[in-house]
Image (spheres, helix red, strand yellow):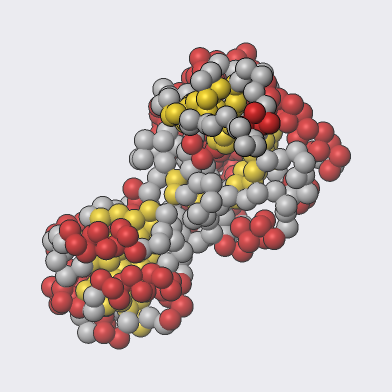
Amino acid sequence: MSEKELRNEVAALRKAAAVLAATDDKTRQKALFLMAGAILSNRSEIHKANEEDIRRAKEEGISPSLLHRLEFTDEKIDTAVKGLRELAMLPDPVGKTLMRRELDPGFVLEKKTFPIGVIAMIFEARPDALVQMAGLCLRSGNTVVLKGGREAMDTNRLLCSIILEATAEAVGCSWLLGIESREDVNALLSMDGLIDLIIPRGSNSFVRFVMDNTRIPVLGHSDGICSVFIDESADIEKAIRISVDSKCQYPAACNAAETFLVHRNIASRFLPLFADAMRDKGVRLHCTDEVLEYIPDGIRAVDSDFDTEYLSLECAVRIVSSVDEAIEHLAEHSSHHTDAIVTESAENRDKYFKLVDSADVFCNASTRFADGFRFGLGAEVGISTSKIHARGPVGLDGLMTTKWLLSGNGETVAEYSGPDAKVFHHKDLI
């Protein structure tokens, strides 16, 4: 569409945002259940569209990691629908009272949650992400512009149509807009008077491009260079199981581990078993010279391997002499997404939790748990490595803002000023 047409569509979203924000909880719940049912009943049509996207992507030589993300299998459809239904049953995020304080008798200040407004989400070739994002915006009372990867064009176009048709009876059909071209994205970046927040999900260079070319607030993360540190006190069997899951359960995900740090005192016992387990899964290991002594068939690592998000069955492995050296490594190389420690030492766990500056820091658990659905958030629009507004998996709370609401009885500032001023008693009511 032309830039003028797109601006008119987004302006309509802005008007619809005020209406959606005022809907009651049951209305938005109903819309989510309608969305879930429509996706299930249109499963065969969704598969046909997805198969066409996959055929075209293979002809164009798409990478294996992107192809994996593009596939909208029965399992992914079922998971997306389950997420919508669980999202519907979460407490209403709109209008929650976060604070109530009496400034003076009968003079009450409240802080409540409200939807952000119009959100633009730009994401990679993942049709399931479209369902999650649409569901989260609907549940939180936000209208949304969705721009998926070109590779998933047919699937995303169909999903937007199914979702809008299904939810029209509950919330109308002006709360979601699907766009497809790069020109549309460039136009969106200039609509700072109409769009309240942009959430990009993609490569580091793309996220940086968005940040550098808009005045609209941007929430997102770039690379997912996640790590697992095997401490000297780690239980070997537990460490192997966590390592394999972190790397292999879904290697194309942003929360898959890309770096493994191993304490020198456990290296001789851990690394040969680790190599066997990874070899069985087809993982290519980029190893420092010291690690190669234990894994002779590994690939000699170069410095850039520890700054690489492989998104495939590859990872980098290094030996460190202490938990402090592991933390120092992360300070230099981590993307501050998700980093885990495997340890039986409460002291080292606590040190890791305090000093590793990442959105998610885990102990004795796979990095793959960094996910809004697994956190009980219903779903997520992405994982934020920002320290402002929202950090980690961004679910409903991350799509809310707040208002201060003050109810009085004719009070004036003059009454609380000067030598005979009334005194606030600031009594917290909740």
| 292 versus 27 height, above or below | below
Judged from this view, the residue extending furthest toward the front is 419
Q: Which residue occupies 27% across, 66% down?
A: 229
**In the depicted view, which residue is nearer to us: 134 or 55?**
134
Q: Is residue 387 left or right of residue 313?
A: right
| 209 versus 417 height, above or below | below
Q: Can residue 161 be seen? A: no
| 200 versus 270 height, above or below | above
**In the depicted view, which residue is nearer to us: 385 or 372?**
385
Q: Quadrant of the N terminus?
A: top right
Q: Position of residue 392 (x, y in %)?
A: 44, 49
Q: Position of residue 117 (x, y in %)?
A: 65, 33
Q: Can residue 380 be seen? A: yes
**In the depicted view, which residue is nearer to us: 373 or 414?**
414
Q: Which residue occupies 72% across, 30% down?
A: 13
Q: Quadrant of residue 51?
A: top right
Q: Quadrant of the C terminus?
A: top left
Q: Is residue 27 left or right of residue 77?
A: right
Q: Which residue occupies 15% across, 60% down?
A: 344
**In the depicted view, which residue is nearer to us: 236 or 72?**
236
Q: Position of residue 363 (x, y in %)?
A: 25, 55
Query: How many marks overall?
Result: 0
Q: Position of residue 367 (x, y in %)?
A: 33, 54
Q: Which residue occupies 46% across, 70% down?
A: 308
